[in-house]
Amino acid sequence: MKFLIQRVNHASVAVDGEVTGEIGLGFLVLIGVSESDTREIADKMIKKLIGLRIFEDLEGKTNLALKDVGGSLLLVSQFTLYADCKKGNRPSFIQAGNPQKANELYEYIIQQCRALGYTAATGIFGADMKINLENDGPFTIMLDSQELLGM
């Protein structure tokens, strides 16, 4: 599983010209699911995501987590995080999870984040989405379960 996390001042996602989700201060999280991912892996990734202290405190140090700043989440499915560009010029996506499994885990992640008390706006799985954001910093982090869990 991969989470591409962008600290944002605001972000929104639209499908067919209609906004499906928007947030103010918080994280835009692009979520990629592989075939080997599980709910247990998702739980560990969520715990790391929520605990990241990448907002500045009064001294300008990145010491504050999402809850400390009253931040929200914009969660967007993104199978292209599993693009394999080793051969040729056309990426392969065979490492991405099948759509049914990926959608189930994406929905699970949304549910778990909301259960933890966070506002979690979303895109629409599998849709052609347009994302608008103001990246704060810019500050972007890649969480990869392979690295996080030592797999």
Image (cartoon, rainbow, N blue to C red):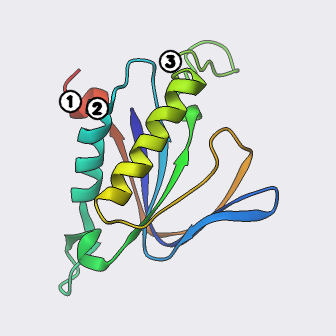
Callout 2: few (<14), some (14-19), or many (20+) C-alpha neighbours within 10 Å? some
Work out how far the residue at label 1 is from the one at label 3, CA to CA, in angstroms: 18 Å
Q: In this view, does 130 lie to the left or right of 115?
A: right
Where in the figure is residue 136, as x and y percent of width and height? Answer: 44, 71
The reply to whether discs 1 and 3 touch (Cβ–Cβ < 8 Å) is: no
For image coordinates 21% across by 81% down, the residue present is: 57
User: Circles 1 and 2: CB distance less than 8 Å?
Assistant: yes
Q: Which amino acid does label 1 sit on?
A: Leu
**Between disc 2 and disc 3, whose residue precedes?**
2
The residue under label 2 is 41
Residue 53 is marked as: none
Disc nearer the start of the sequence (1/3): 3
- Residue under numbered circle 3: 95
Displayed quadrant of residue 37: top left
Whether residue 95 appears in this view of the structure is yes
Q: Is residue 133 visible?
A: no
Circle nearer the viewer, 1 or 2: 2
Residue 50 sits in quarter: bottom left
Residue 149 image label: 1
142 or 117, nearer to the observer: 117
From this view, report whether residue 91 is shown above or below residue 49: above
